[in-house]
Image: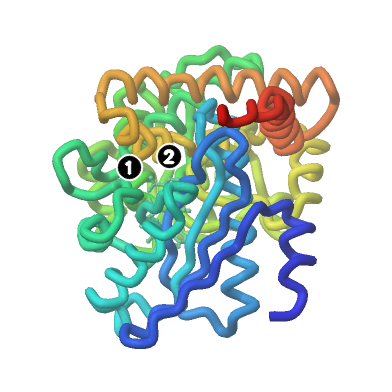
């Protein structure tokens, strides 16, 4: 494939591996962006990509994102991700999952896989039959559904953002607009409601809305009206790229803090929020609860330890927002700088030459 090394260089990757299995039709790419802090960990996405370039771009982008997420979360893990070029509804077979499991095993532990779009917990169970390097299965010691922990982390991050913004950290009486009340949004609504927040919600599925309204009480708005809701916090918990030139001018919130990945459509949107005085809790820092949860399997899963670690999202968001204020840079840049600082320090430590083998 033309230009692969150019891509690796511009994204800063260590390794890209292509796997093919003729019998099952597996076409997979595993991207290891960095192992500076530890083995790379990230989910496997099964998606019907339009072409190989699109699949390669996705794995490069996603695996780099995992490096930053793990670094800021204080985990001793690197960034990796896998993509399988197939339609998860029509083309996924046990043979394909077996071939993928063998591919992961062949990476020798440099890459640890988990669930992502198009993959389920039961798929991870199948994959685990062929590799030690898979987490998030239903086995004993498996970490299970990560969305509760993701929501708990977002809830902690919201308190931190309120505190730094000078609004006090209590959510009692705060108005929070949630876009998408699926797995994470539902649990977030539960935490917020228990803390006394007033909820405004939207979703494209009526069932999801009904459940939240019945259990927690919430005002409901149409999907396109959520941006203009007068509130303290806007919580994107559905899709990426929702903070853009069309939506930002509509915002009436003081803070944006939600679980969705890649919320900024472009870097410039982070600057736009900053110049408008809207405090943005960077997505990969506030939504790291799920990663912390799944990574905990590697040290023997312990619920109390995971809760304590996810609570640290509070400090992470405080540190990012304080740095943003102090250096007059948008929070997304402050988060990147913190991740890069941790990587640079770790690289310095590992620069010591490996002692020569005794002969
Ligand atoms: P989900 O699919 O369970 O929930 C998403 C919800 O958003 C669904 O109810 C869907 O109907 C709704 N939705 C979709 N389009 C919408 C629109 N245009 N307007 C309003 N609602 C819309 O997914 P999830 O697991 O809750 O994850 C939510 C987001 O958080 C995703 O971006 C995901 O990548 C991110 N995230 C999730 C986790 C996790 O632990 N599940 C961890 C980190 C990041």
Residues at badges 1 and 2 in contact (C-beta under 8 Å)?
yes
Q: Helix, strand, or loop for circle 1? A: loop
Above or below, comparing residue 47 to residue 294 in the picture: below
* Residue behind mark 2: 291
**Label 1 beta carbon within 8 A of ligand 1:** yes
Q: Nearer the N terminus, badge 1 or badge 2?
A: 1
**Label 2 beta carbon within 8 A of ligand 1:** yes
Q: Residue at x 64, y 17 (%)?
A: 164
Q: Is 139 left or right of 166, judged from the image as shown?
A: left
Question: In the picture, residue 161 is in which quadrant?
Answer: top right
Q: Helix, strand, or loop for circle 2? A: helix
- Rendering quadrant holding ligand 1: bottom left
Q: Residue at x 68, y 80 (%)?
A: 1
Viewer-closest of 37 and 248: 37
Q: Is 162 left or right of 190, judged from the image as shown?
A: right
Q: How packed is label 1: few (under 14 Cα within 10 Å), some, or many (20 or more)?
A: some
Question: In the picture, residue 103 is in which quadrant?
Answer: bottom left
Furthest toward the left, the residue is 140
Q: Quadrant of the C terminus?
A: top right
Viewer-nearest of discs 1 and 2: 2
Viewer-closest of 245 and 110: 110
* Residue behind mark 1: 146
Q: How is the image coloured?
A: rainbow
Question: In the picture, residue 118 is in which quadrant?
Answer: bottom left
Q: Position of residue 341 (x, y in %)?
A: 73, 27
Viewer-closest of 271 and 201: 271
Q: Is 64 left or right of 92, judged from the image as shown?
A: right
Q: How packed is label 2: few (under 14 Cα within 10 Å), some, or many (20 or more)?
A: many
The disc placed on residue 237 is none
Q: Position of residue 200 (x, y in %)?
A: 43, 42
Q: Position of residue 233 (x, y in %)?
A: 55, 34
Examine the rendering and report whether any part of residue 183 can be seen: yes
């Amino acid at each position: 494939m033309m230009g692969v090394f150019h891509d690796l260089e511009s994204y800063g990757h260590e390794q890209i591996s292509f796997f093919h299995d003729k019998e099952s039709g597996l076409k997979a790419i595993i991207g290891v962006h960095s192992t500076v802090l530890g083995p790379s960990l990230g989910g496997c996405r099964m998606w019907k990509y339009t072409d190989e370039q699109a699949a390669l771009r996705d794995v490069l982008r996603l695996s780099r994102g995992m490096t930053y997420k793990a670094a800021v979360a204080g985990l001793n893990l690197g960034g990796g991700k896998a993509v399988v070029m197939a339609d998860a509804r029509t083309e996924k077979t046990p043979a394909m999952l077996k071939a993928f499991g063998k591919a992961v095993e062949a990476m020798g532990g440099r890459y640890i896989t988990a669930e992502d779009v198009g993959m389920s917990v039961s798929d991870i169970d199948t994959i685990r039959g062929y590799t030690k390097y898979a987490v998030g299965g239903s086995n004993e010691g498996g970490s299970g559904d990560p969305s509760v922990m993701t929501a708990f982390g977002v809830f902690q991050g919201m308190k931190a953002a309120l505190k730094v913004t000078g609004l006090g950290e209590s959510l009692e009486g705060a108005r929070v607009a949630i876009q998408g009340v699926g797995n994470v949004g539902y649990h977030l609504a539960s935490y917020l409601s228990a803390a006394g927040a007033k909820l405004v919600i939207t979703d494209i599925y009526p069932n999801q809305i009904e459940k939240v309204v019945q259990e927690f009480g919430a005002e409901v708005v149409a999907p396109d009206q959520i941006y203009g809701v007068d509130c303290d916090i806007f919580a994107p918990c559905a899709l990426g790229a929702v903070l853009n030139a069309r939506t930002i001018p509509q915002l009436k919130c003081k803070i944006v803090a939600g679980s969705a990945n890649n919320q900024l459509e472009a870097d410039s949107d982070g600057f736009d929020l900053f110049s408008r005085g809207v405090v943005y809790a960077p997505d990969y820092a506030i939504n790291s609860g799920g990663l912390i949860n799944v990574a905990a399997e590697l040290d023997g899963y312990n619920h109390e330890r995971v809760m304590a670690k996810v609570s640290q999202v509070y400090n992470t968001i405080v540190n990012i927002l304080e740095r943003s204020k102090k250096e007059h840079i948008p929070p997304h840049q402050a988060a990147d700088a913190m991740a890069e600082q941790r990587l640079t320090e770790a690289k310095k430590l590992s620069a010591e030459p490996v002692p020569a083998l005794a002969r």
